[in-house]
Every structure is written in structure tokens, then in C-alpha cells.
Image (cartoon, helix red, strand yellow):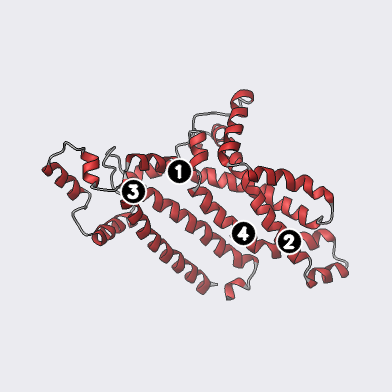
Amino acid sequence: MIIYTIRKLTGALAVLLVLSALVFMAGRALTPGDPALLIAGPKAGPETLENIRHSLHLDRPVFEQYLSWLGDAIRGDFGTSPYSGQANRDVILQQAPVSFELALMGLLIAIAVGIPAGVYVATRARSARVWLVRLPLLIAFAFPAFVSGAFALYIATHYFTNLYSPSYIPISDGLIANLQTMLLPALAVGVPTAPLIMQMTRSSMLEVLSAPYTSTARSNGIAEWRVTYLYGLRAALPPVLTLIGMIFGLLVGGLFIVEQIFSLPGLGRGILDSIKLRDFTQVTGQALVLAAAFILGNLVVDLVLPLIDRRIART
């Protein structure tokens, strides 16, 4: 188990290192031409442009720029925005909790809906009643996020004004007030995501429930609920958890539309604003946090899986 953990941690760090280089290069690519000229304006003199290039290390080779940025990023310093003059670390610390909370709440809703629905559909595969569960979720999955989000926002602002707060309230200011802000966006994220987890749970459960050892368990007189949940669901969880880890990373990095609709000051919305301003220093830091979130989600799943199936740690 120790060797397995070390191997996974080393792999995650290696992937993050490669992604950091790609993120850095992509951030520079967002600013075609001379970034100093974009920052200072077309009327800036040569001395002003040279000072900006020097302050942003643009007068160095790209590889040296990357190593300098990476060393600062490891220490938690993502530079300073040349437009606002604000430290990018402070901006990220304001935006990241919003996106992480929204992604986590949406994922918990998707899990709470998707796994029970998948188990129900798998254990009643020959019953027509399964479509009472599958069809609404598949319809929800078919709607784009901007449609479901806009519809949910319309319903909340017209009929449930006491239950929804349009202004973001951090959890430090009160749990109930925070839920009034975040619950509706989380539903807009979680409900369309639940069908993915339902389908994976259903597929994995059908395979496990048809395995010889579950038939043996039934023939030995073990109760059906024990066969389903203690034997079947536990054996079916590894691929479901793998999918959940991927979904978490995708949610953190794919909340642009939902954050825009509900006016949430998260990373997704922040990246859009940074791209509009061509603020490559801020985009680079924000994108690196999103990449780290994706890797972290998958790393947590990789470390949890051996607790469910000990054979995984030996692979």
C-alpha cells in the first residue's frame, strides 16, 4: 500500500509539472503580439515598454521565464496582475473556494441521485418501471447547462424569492445564507451530472450481479439486500469512483456558464474576465489551480480505491 501511494503521488506530481508547462505556454499564447504594448497602450514610449517587459520577465528566454514562474508558483506566488495591480494569489484565494464549493455540492447531489438510481435500475432491469427513474434523468442530461441554469434561475427569482439569494454569501458569513446562494447553482450542476453516475453504476452493478459469486451468495440463503449492497455495490464501486474523480475535475474547470448565469465570483468566471483583458499572468495562475483540482480529484480516488478493493494496491 505504501509503494502504491508513493507511485500515485509521484505520478500526480509529474502530470502537474507537465501541465504547468502547458498552462504557462497557453497563457503566453493568449497574448498575441507584444504583451507590454497591450498593457501600456499604443502611445507608450520605448522606455516604458522596456520597463514593463523587464518587470514581467519578458526580456528573458521562454524557458527561463517558465522556470522563474514555476519557482514562484511553488511558493504560492502567482505574480501580480499588470492591469489591476492586485496579487494573483489574492484573486485566486477569493475565487477558488466558490468554484470548489459549487463543484463539491454539485457532485454530492449527483452522487446522492445517481448511485441509488443506478442500483434501482440495475436490480429491476426487466421491469418497465425503471423508465420512471431513467427517463427524467436522461432528459435532464440532454439539456445544456445554460438552459437548465437559466430555467432554475427564473423559477427561483419569480416563485421562491425567500429561498434564493442572488448575491454570493460566503460560508463564513453563515451556513444558511450560503446555502441560499449556492444550493440552486449546485442543483443546476448536479442534476444533469447524475445520469452519468447512474449509467456507470447501472452498468457496473449488472456485471457484478450476474457474476458467479453473487449467485452462490443467493443460493446460500443470504438476504437479497445483503447481496445487492454488501456484495454487489461494493464490488461495483471502483469504476463509479473513478468516474466521480474525473467528474469533480471537470466540474471545477467547467463551471464557466453556471457561474456566469448565477453571478458567482468563481474561477470559471474569473478566467473569462482575465481572457477578455488578455491578462496572461492571472490566467496562468487560475488555469494551474484548475489543473491541480483535476489531478487532486483523481488522486483522491486512486488512494481510496484500495480501501474498497485491496487487489488494486497490488497492481
In the rendered structure, which amino acid carries the disc numbered 1?
Gly
The disc label shown at residue 78, or none: none
Q: Are marks 2 and 4 in contact (CB under 8 Å)?
A: no
Q: Where residue 113 appears, x then y in whole percent?
A: 68, 47
Q: Indicate which label's residue lies in the foreground, 4 or 1.
A: 1
Q: Which residue matches tag 1? A: 268
In the picture provided, is 172 more to the left or to the right than 74? Answer: right
In the rendered structure, which amino acid carries the disc numbered 3?
Leu
The disc label shown at residue 205, or none: 2
The disc label shown at residue 30, or none: 3
Query: Distance between the Cα atoms at labels 2 and 1?
Result: 35 Å
Quadrant (top left, top right, bottom left, bottom right) of the N terminus? bottom right
Q: Classify mark 2: helix, strand or loop.
A: helix
Q: Which residue matches tag 4? A: 241
In the picture provided, is 24 more to the left or to the right than 230? Answer: left
Q: Classify mark 3: helix, strand or loop.
A: loop
The earlier-in-sequence mark between 2 and 1 is 2
Query: Distance between the Cα atoms at labels 3 and 1?
Result: 16 Å
Corner quadrant of residue 118: bottom right
Q: Is residue 39 above or below residue 15?
A: above
Neighbor class of circle 4 (other Cα within 10 Å; few <14, some 14-19, many 20+) is many
Q: Where residue 156 appears, x then y in whole percent?
A: 61, 28
